[in-house]
Every structure is written in C-alpha cells, then in structure tokens.
Amino acid sequence: MCQDGPPAEDSGNGDGEPTEAGQAGGAFPAMRKEDHHMTTTTTTTAHDTAQGPQPQPLGPPPATTVPWVLDLVSGISSTPKPAAITLTTNPVLIGSAYPGWMRAGLKINMSEFKQANFVLEYEGVPEGHTVDIGDSPTNDGWGGDAGSASCAEVHIVSQNVLIYGKAYAPGHVHQFAALHDSLEDGALKVVVRDKFVSVGQPHFQVQNAEMFQLPDGTNPDRSTIYAAFNSVITQRKDRYGKGLRRVMITLQ
C-alpha cells in the first residue's frame, strides 16, 4: 500500500472532419480536324499474375476527441465535453488565499483511448499547487497516494514539475524527475499513456512500469486517471495554487 511522501518543499469545440480537396478543373485542349485520315491503335495488357501482395487500404485514423478547454478564472468550459471526462469538482473560487482563481478536479475514462494530452496555459507567475495528474482518487501531491495502491503522479508546484512512481515505505517514494521550468506566462504539455509520461517543452519523458498502467490491475476503475487544477486531486485545503489559467484536454 502506498503512503504519501512528506513534502520536500515547501510525479488534457466541434469535431471537424478533414475537408476533401476539390477536383482540379480545366478544359482539354481543342482538337483540330485534319484533312488526312487518323489511325487509332488499342493495346490490351494481360493481368500480371506474378505480382506480390497488393497494398491494403489504410484503416480508419485513431479516434481523437474534440479539444476540451476549461478556464480557471471564468469557470467556463467549451462544449461539447467528451463523454469520457467527468468533473469531480466543478470550478469553484479558491477564496482569500488566491483571490480570483478557481480550482477544479476531474476523472478520465481511458477505456476507449490510449493517450491523454494536457496543454497547460499559465498566466503570471504560478504559486502553490497548480497541477496534479495521477492514477488514484487519493493522490494529493508529493508522490504516494494517501491510502490506495496506485501511485503514478505528475505534480506541479510553483514552477517545479515532479514525476513520481511507487512508494516503497512511508516517506520513501520513487521520484523519477524534479524539473524546474519557466512557466511564467508560458505553457506546458503533459502526455500520459500506458507506462509512459512526457512533459515539455523542453521535452522530458519517462517510460517505466511504475508510470500510469492502463488498464491498471491495482485500480478498481482500471482505466481511469485523475487530474486537478490549481489544487491536488484530493482537494486538500492546504494544497491549492494559482496561475494555471486554462487547460486543454484531448484524448486519442
């Protein structure tokens, strides 16, 4: 059972279809009649039975959801929201700690998708806990998960990006990365798929069995990941933040 590591501070619009190009127009050059006779020869070519396997038609492209955007100042989100995304904490004002800023939480059912993409847009200098993406509803930052067996976590505190795997004992978690990124008025992309996490730019990735396991045999939801914005997943009152203005999520 994973235990929460102690703080060391202080480890995703209408769907547009591709438009087919129109056929090129243009008239054929005019044919000029001549006084003499014309002879036409037709050649028939037999089917070449010696050819190897013929190319097969391409299958349908991977399913990708319409990008869904949530604003953490206005609380407004785009429509439609993919059915796989469920808000667990509706956008709500944080209060006196960070006036004007909202926090929110959600879960994503990945049973029909292989990858979740989060594009995080910051406004001003971020403070506190602005992003927490994990595989447990009890993730609360700093690795571990305060009680259940799932452990993978991407945690952004101020301008530090932390990537965690499993916890080995109380107070001992496997930290894969502690990156310092300049997030002031900037943006960051986080990609989550089976046993894989990447963040960037600058690009950094972790591919390891301790990362998100989709499906996850230790998680009763099996194919669910969780995310919180300007807070941690458990919405702990002492772990809020400000500066994350918008998040855009696509699933594929």
Image: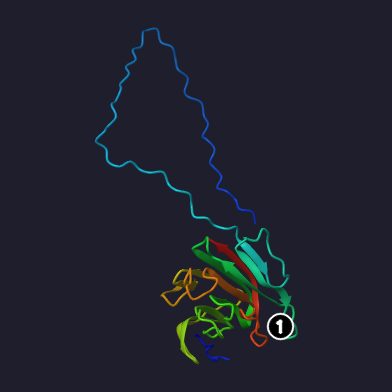
Picture coordinates of residue 125 (x, y %)? 63, 80
Binning the other alpha carbons within 10 Å of mark 1 as few (below 14), some (14 to 19) or many (20 upward) gives some
**Residue positioned most to the left:** 50
Residue located at (65% from left, 57% from top): 13
In this rendering, is residue 207 above or below 57? below
Residue located at (52% from left, 68% from top): 223
Picture coordinates of residue 35 (x, y %)? 40, 7
Label 1 sits on a secondary structure element that is loop
Depth check, front residue: 154 or 41: 154
Image quarter for residue 42? top left
In this rendering, is residue 18 above or below 250? above
Picture coordinates of residue 183 (x, y %)? 57, 77
Residue 53 placement, left or right of 154: left
Amino acid, disc 1? Tyr
Image quarter for residue 141? bottom right
Picture coordinates of residue 168 (x, y %)? 45, 88
Q: Is residue 6 visible?
A: yes
Residue 222 placement, left or right of 123: left
Depth check, front residue: 248 or 38: 248
Residue located at (66% from left, 69% from top): 87
Residue identifier under label 1: 98
Q: How is the image coloured?
A: rainbow
Number of numbered discs: 1
Residue 30 placement, left or right of 246: left
Q: Is residue 187 visible?
A: no
In this rendering, is residue 135 above or below 34? below
Image quarter for residue 239? bottom right
Depth check, front residue: 238 or 247: 238
